[in-house]
Image (tube, rainbow, N blue to C red):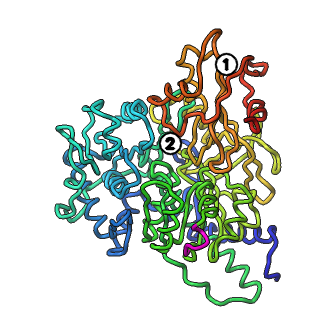
Amino acid sequence: MSSDPTASELVDDFNAAIATLTAPGAPFGWTVRDVNGASVRVYDNAIPDMRAVWAMSAAHGDKDYLVYGDERYSYTEAHARVRALARHLRTEHGAGRGTRVAISMRNYPEWVLSHWAAMSVGAAVVGMNSWWTRPEMEFALDDSDPVALIIDGERLERLGSARDDVPLIVTRHDGELPAAARIWDEVADPATAPGTLPEADIDPDDDALIFYTSGTTGTPKGAQLTHRAVVHNLLNMVFLTACGDAARAQRMARSGHEEPPPEAPPVIAMLPVPLFHVTGCNCVLHTVTIAGGCLVMMYRWDAAEALRLIEREGVTVFTGVPSMSREMLQHPDWENADTSSLRSMGGGGAAIPTDLVRRIDDGLSQGRPGVGYGLTETAGVATAISNEFYVANPSSVGPLVPCMEAKIVDEEGARLDPGQRGELLLRGPNVMKGYLNRPDATAEAIVDGWFRTGDIAEIDADGWIFIKDRIKDVVIRGGENIHCSEVENALYELDEVAEVAVFGLPDERLGEEVAAAVVLAPGAELDQAALAEHLGGRLARFKHPRRVWFLDEPLPRNANGKFLKRELRDRFTAAP
């Protein structure tokens, strides 16, 4: 057998490994069961809930778990703090099954520990976007109605005294606290921790996490991710590593090289993406925890600091949005930094350009690139591929994870054949239960158990998926989903605006940048600075249009009266 297998051979190897690992009785064997009214594939060996996942990690003892600046937390200390906080949430706030605990802060260790404490007592964690403005924060609190809000000082100052009806637990704040607020370090003091977690009654289909997606009608939607969904995403992440190893071993055996595989390096993962997204929480944090790995956290993204931490901590896994990988590879410190510990570099949140796949592969001395495709509504990855399998097929996002099914449909919902392009629909136990308090939006998104992704894709004869375009009116800027209608609704509040269309333009660093075409009312005057000032108190800054054109003619429309955003995008892509 050739030492350099073809792309087709690598696909065959990977698909053969999938069949082996998912056979009846195999580690990832599955059975079709009814979940929330849909017949889906459920892993036979699935862990019951995320409380059990956290309990399993106690065995890692004094190994480093969290690193933030000069702060280090072992698994033993983390468990003590989680037990203390869990008792406080249960006894003082009534947190448990059917309740919610909101977290609003940067990527601090307290986010991680608060997340485990809340889920361990059966409460759903509401992950609030740390970039939200005060109105956006207030909306999420009204929508989710948490029994407690765990918040850092920066977000507390932003929220102000607007929410004295929500009990506060505050961390990393030097200013004056509201009268009833508690200090995180006091209620999560390991010296006061009981010997065990409070008892909890958790059903696999209870909500574990609620993550908000940008709203298509002006307000965000809270995706309800169950314990079953989050556990299955975690097992999918474990499966993908196992599948790559198995495919590689099969290929080596056929070639006559049957020496044992090299010992896997420790899991030391850098977390440059937010914990309030499924990539950071479900795909990085949960995977690191079950593996007994170490999570290296950052205050904010900075390529130079990332390289310094990779060298200092011996980081083996880097998971970010594509712009982060590109910035590190292009940084002047890259050549002198010791990145030899890296075994994987890539992530999700946006498509990885094929040139970046090659750059990563060429730039790492010991590692390879990887990519995952999924959505908030699928609790994480629906497909993923890495190492030589990805390098050989850089335009694909890989095959489906075993517990998911996919189909491509046309505009009428009819199923299309392999190789035909249409909307990608997904079904599986890791699809969300629904959108919180939004039955109409849920019914529109999930039809007969199939989740409509809004992405245009193809599935080839081997079952590998290729994402081509998006139906949804959304811009993905540096991994952040920005629904255009949310920005348009805010701009239409200005009396001067007669018509506005928000769309995405290609951006080398961020993947896409937010752009807007604006038609003013007769006699009105407005400039981009005034637009920015208006949006400042309404939308997080990453949603603000960075490129704006003021047009004298009406915006182009189709026969149904909808703006032709593709035409605008093509027109302004190269425009100054």
Residue 179 vertical position relative to residue 550 in the rendered view, above or below: below
Extent of the magenta region: 333-338
The quadrant of the picture occupied by the C terminus is: top right
Q: Are marks 1 and 2 in contact (CB under 8 Å)?
A: no
Residue bearing mark 2 = 433
Residue 3 vertical position relative to residue 18 in the rendered view, above or below: below
Q: Secondary structure at mark 1?
A: strand
Expressed as whole percent of the image width and height from the top left, the position of residue 30 reads 58, 61
Residue 362 vertical position relative to residue 448 in the rendered view, above or below: below
**Residue 98 in sight here:** no
Local crowd size for mark 1, using a 10 Å CA cut-off: few (<14), some (14–19), many (≥20)? many
Answer whether residue 393 is magenta in the image. Answer: no
Q: Amino acid at mark 1?
A: Val
In terms of image quadrants, where is residue 259?
bottom right
Q: Nearer the viewer, mark 1 or mark 2?
A: 1
Give me the residue at 33% from left, 70% from top.
74
In terms of depth relative to the viewer, which is nearer, 252 or 497?
497
The secondary structure making up most of the magenta span is: loop
In terms of depth relative to the viewer, which is nearer, 521 or 429?
521
Expressed as whole percent of the image width and height from the top left, the position of residue 203 reads 39, 50
Q: Left or right of 64: which side holds 519?
A: right
Residue bearing mark 1 = 519
Rounded to the nearest angstrom, the CA distance separating label 1 from label 2 is 40 Å
